[in-house]
Amino acid sequence: MVKKITIDPITRLEGHGKIEIFLDENGNATNAYLQVPELKGFEQFCLGRPVEELPRITPRICGVCPTTHHMAATKAVDAVYNVIPTETAVKVRRVIYDAFMMEDHLLHFFFLGGPDFVVGPDAAPGERNILGVVGKVGVEIGKKVIDMRRRLRSIITTLGGRVIHPVCGLPGGVSKGITEEQRKEFLQIAKDSVEFAKFTLKVFEDIVLKNKTYVDLIVGDIYKHKTYYMGMVDENNHPDFYDGKIRVVDPDGVEIAKFAPKDYLDHIVERVEPWSYMKFPYLKKVGWKGFVDGKDSGVYRVAPLARLNVADGMSTPLAQAEFEKMFSILGGKPAHNTLAFHWARLIEVMFAAEHLVTLLEDKTITSTDIRRLPTDTPNEGVGIVEAPRGTLIHHYKTDEKGMVTGVNLIVATVGNSAAMSMSIAKAAQNLIKNGVVNDSILNMVEMAFRPYDPCLACATHSLPGKMPLMVNVYDKDKNKIKTITRD
Amino acid sequence: MKTLVLGLGNTILSDDGVGIHIAFEIEKKCKNIDVLEASAAGFRVIDEIIGYEKLILIDSIKTGKAEPGELHRFTFAEFSRTMHHSSPHDISLFEAFDIMKKEKADLPTDIKVYAVEVTDTSTFSESCTDEVAKAIPQIVEILIEENKLT
């Protein structure tokens, strides 16, 4: 008898995925897939519009990281117009981007990934939630997290020109510069964020690394996949969130590709599967061998751990020290431990904080030379940034008047789509045996995809806001034989 | 009373943007309010609510039990029952609200939650479907009247 288990966030009306786990006749998990709903016609929607509109439209694709899409789109529009933004404009964009990466990563660690680590996978369902995190770390710390994120977001709002949805990016520059007064204010926030990053890493050390159960989970086989990794690096092969070349390493850490954003199609192929609306990109050079890991499979991973795996080191001192510590504990680079994405995320918080200080200590950032006007005829361009969830690719084509004739996006979560299904399947195979599917096992299965911080679609906000998890178990004829609900 | 009208939704996903369209229509008619749109929720908007005494939240909903364009009214309490993630990458506004309350933030005490029954929230379009679009002017009037917005 084949059973099907569905982990489905039922009250989310649109914009959500579900996990389907298939059991064999003995009740052991055989396979698992992550499915997402369809959003129809984005490319069609963009066609015929002035390409400058895309930095305002594409952030709407995602209710989670509008800043990331705005930045990738702005860079793609720079490329379409063949205009190099002024030095100051690039610095301003980087300030916004560092602040964004930090606030997003902090939200994930404390509140979203938090239930898995901070509270713990074995905690009672009633505690394994956001308030459980606040309960564990304390109200005071909760306050600190909220305050730090609020201050970082104030940088994004001020420079982005608008609350939540930035509108500052223009081809060749930005619409607004930084005043000396703002520079000083933001520098203080940046310095405080370095201290906050230290504190966050200490929380991770105290709660996670000092707990043998957690460490065993991180280094254990359940949450491990030997894949290729992809991330953007600077000229020293250090991670760069905003600009650089895309570096790919194999499961042994050997560089197999390093390419400019415009050449991405020479390296990445997007595979379509009949059962999913999500595409599954893989490395062209290696080829598609199915949902498997190893050197022969072109499946690659993106996001924090991938970025650190492709890097030779970090460009800032405190982040470098944390980078060395992590890889030493995980047994070298690349690290294949999916749960270490959480750890790598915090090292990136430190890097972004230190990098932000450097940017804002530079007084030339207040220059008013914030835009270079485009003079070339628009044509085609690719913009890539490292989103919190991985490499984000925007590719636009226009006619000679700058009207959009083609759009291709590879969003970060899609970069991890094959790996996510593999991670869920592996956890399910290890944890679901003889038909025993209880709540804590499902927590552990969920833990397999949460490190990727998946961002599945756009309509992430329709009411109602409550969301229990429902698990349906089906027999081979797809009759529902069991339902587990958690709320 | 310092009032924020918050439209939630996505203006490029057909009916999903109805809350935002309504919020901006109200802004055209009333002076003594602030209006904000968000294609996000939870911790990504909660900061913007702090400091207001009254919050009017407008979103879309698909209950399938009402006609498209019909207005639903909810109490805030109806949404704050669960503390689990509303998505893998954010928590709901109501959860964020509870946490902020615990952190003693200066949050609105008078909260009205409205949702418009919709049909299509998955096709990329800047316009609502006909029935929903037709209902907007009337809903704007109802919300202004009910909340005595000026």
Image: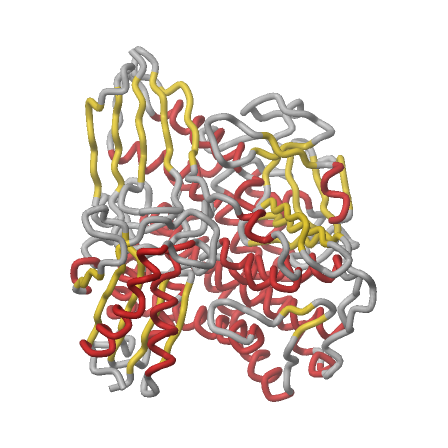
Residue at image point 22% right, 61% down = B71
Q: Where is residue A169? Give x, y as percent.
A: 64, 68
Q: Where is residue A255? Give x, y as percent.
A: 75, 37
Frontmost residue, A232 versus A478:
A478
What is the quadrant of the N terminus of chain A in the image? Answer: top left
Frontmost residue, A39 versus B25:
B25
The answer to whether residue B33 is above or below residue A170 is: below
The answer to whether residue B146 is above or below residue A402 is: below
The answer to whether residue A149 is above or below residue A16 is: below
Q: Is residue A47 left or right of residue B96?
A: right
Residue at image point 38% right, 67% down = B21
Q: Where is residue A156? Give x, y as percent.
A: 54, 72
Q: Is residue A430 visible?
A: yes
Residue at image point 53% right, 76% down = A189
Q: Is residue A314 visible?
A: no
Displayed quadrant of residue A295:
top right
Q: Where is residue B106? Give x, y as percent.
A: 28, 79
Residue at image point 54% right, 41% down = A414
